[in-house]
């Protein structure tokens, strides 16, 4: 380990918020049935209602697992074998949804867009116009694999009259912009603790609408995933009866990080990430980096996806940066070797961290002026 702290600029995990770090180190070990833990859980539930803009009657809770468990729990609880499900796919996380929904027994149809492009609300409208009643529509809000922000409000508007449940992957957006679950009419929303909230990985904050809970209660078949069954979740979070041993230390850390995020303000966090992203783009453009997402309105503020300049060796350059204590992410699947993905989630979206990255990049590439352009674009003193 070098003396200087490692700079983690991947789009998850993100650097821990100091309050989460302190909570991890400072809290004593308590049992999962301890009244003090239930008191913290109640505050987490209230803060999650604020985070998601959840209407009355929504169950908020943490699943003991990462964002992928949040994704899988939705399909396991809300689909029964043979149910028609419509999934938006414009990247790796949409594709993961298809895999999970298929395993849950859903009859999957997809609405697709090429990597770097957003899903089209009209395509959802067309797909929903058939005579078959779709039980569940699922899509990723921010597609971390390509840096695309899907037009969720417009898609939700198209889904609402169909009567289908709406499940939203907010892993890349929750905690970094206001979310209006009530206004969207969303039925299931989830994120992962280690993304925009900058808590340690290991818990997935979820919100389940009253309508989704009612559909779940009316299932004809048992929920195939016992561990994340919504009924079991309610047993622990609302009736305070034992279901499984929750990771109490992770609850404390998430609680602290979530409080800090709401205290800063979600619009403020959105503006912070956007300002740094624009400054990084301005700093790197003269080197030949270009935005991977052509349409500015479709760019995800929390993941800056940049096409690499011709001739830049992806693996060697990132390895050299890693040697100097900076981690950035490459592409996934079809974008591997083609793009870099710079995380602007939570504590990753800090000017000092990006200054460090850009100055190390200057060293690796043997160029100058990048950090200065960043500082000028951000309006901070050089
Ligand atoms: C990271 C991520 C996931 C998966 O979360 P894990 O915590 O890695 O399991 C799902 N969806 C999106 C959009 C993500 O960014």
Image: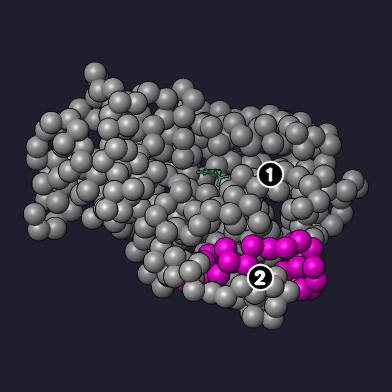
Report ligand 1 position as a quadrant.
Answer: top right
Residue 14 appears left or right of 192: left
Kindly report the secondary structure that dominates the magenta region of the rendered protein.
Answer: helix
**Mark positioned earlier in the residue sequence (2 or 1):** 2
Could you say which disc has been placed on residue 56 in the image? 2
Element under disc 1: helix
Label 2: element kind: loop
**Residue 27 % position (x, y):** 54, 74
Question: Relative to 120, is 68 above or below?
Answer: below
Spatial CA distance of label 2 from label 1 is 24 Å
Which residue shows up at 53% across the image and 53% down it?
A: 201
Badge number at residue 72: 1
Q: Where residue 44 is drawn, which disc sits there?
A: none
Residue span colored magenta: 233-261
Give the class, few, some or many, for how many residues have Cα within 10 Å of label 1's Cα (few <14, many ≥20).
some
Q: Position of residue 349 (x, y in %)?
A: 33, 54
Residue in the foreground of this view, choosing between 244 and 303: 244
- Left or right of 289 on screen, residue 115: right
């Amino acid at each position: 380990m070098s003396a200087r702290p490692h700079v983690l600029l991947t789009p998850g995990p993100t650097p821990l918020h100091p309050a989460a770090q302190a909570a991890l180190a400072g809290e004593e070990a308590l049992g999962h049935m301890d009244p003090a833990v239930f008191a913290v859980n109640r505050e987490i539930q209230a803060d999650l209602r604020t985070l998601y803009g959840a209407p009355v009657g929504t169950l908020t809770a943490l699943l003991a697992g990462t964002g992928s468990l949040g994704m899988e729990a939705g399909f396991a609880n809300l689909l029964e074998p043979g149910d028609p499900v419509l999934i938006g796919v414009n990247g790796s996380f949409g594709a993961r949804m298809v895999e999970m929904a298929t395993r849950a027994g859903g009859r999957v149809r997809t609405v697709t867009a090429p990597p770097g492009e957003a899903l089209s609300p009209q395509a959802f409208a067309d797909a929903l116009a058939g005579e078959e009643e779709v039980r569940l529509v699922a899509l990723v809000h921010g597609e971390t694999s390509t840096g695309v922000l899907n037009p969720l409000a417009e898609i939700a508007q198209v889904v609402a009259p169909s009567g289908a449940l709406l499940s939203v992957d907010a892993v890349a957006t929750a905690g970094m912009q206001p979310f209006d679950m009530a206004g969207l009419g969303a039925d299931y929303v989830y994120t992962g603790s280690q993304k925009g909230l900058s808590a340690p990985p290991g818990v997935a904050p979820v919100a389940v609408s009253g309508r989704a809970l009612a559909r779940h209660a009316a299932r004809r078949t048992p929920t195939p995933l016992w561990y994340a069954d919504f009924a079991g979740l309610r047993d622990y979070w609302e009736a305070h009866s034992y279901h499984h041993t929750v990771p109490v230390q992770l609850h404390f850390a998430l609680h602290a990080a979530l409080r800090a995020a709401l205290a800063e303000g979600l619009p403020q966090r959105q503006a912070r990430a956007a300002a740094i992203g624009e400054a990084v783009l301005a700093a790197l453009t003269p080197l030949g980096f270009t935005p991977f997402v052509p349409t500015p309105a479709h760019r995800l503020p929390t993941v800056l996806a940049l096409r690499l300049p011709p001739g830049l060796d992806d693996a060697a350059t990132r390895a050299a940066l890693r040697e100097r204590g900076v981690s950035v992410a490459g592409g996934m699947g079809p974008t591997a070797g083609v793009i870099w993905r710079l995380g602007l989630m939570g504590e990753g979206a800090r000017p000092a961290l990006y200054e460090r990255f850009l100055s190390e990049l200057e060293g690796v590439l043997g160029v100058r002026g990048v950090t200065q352009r960043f500082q000028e674009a951000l309006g901070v003193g050089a």
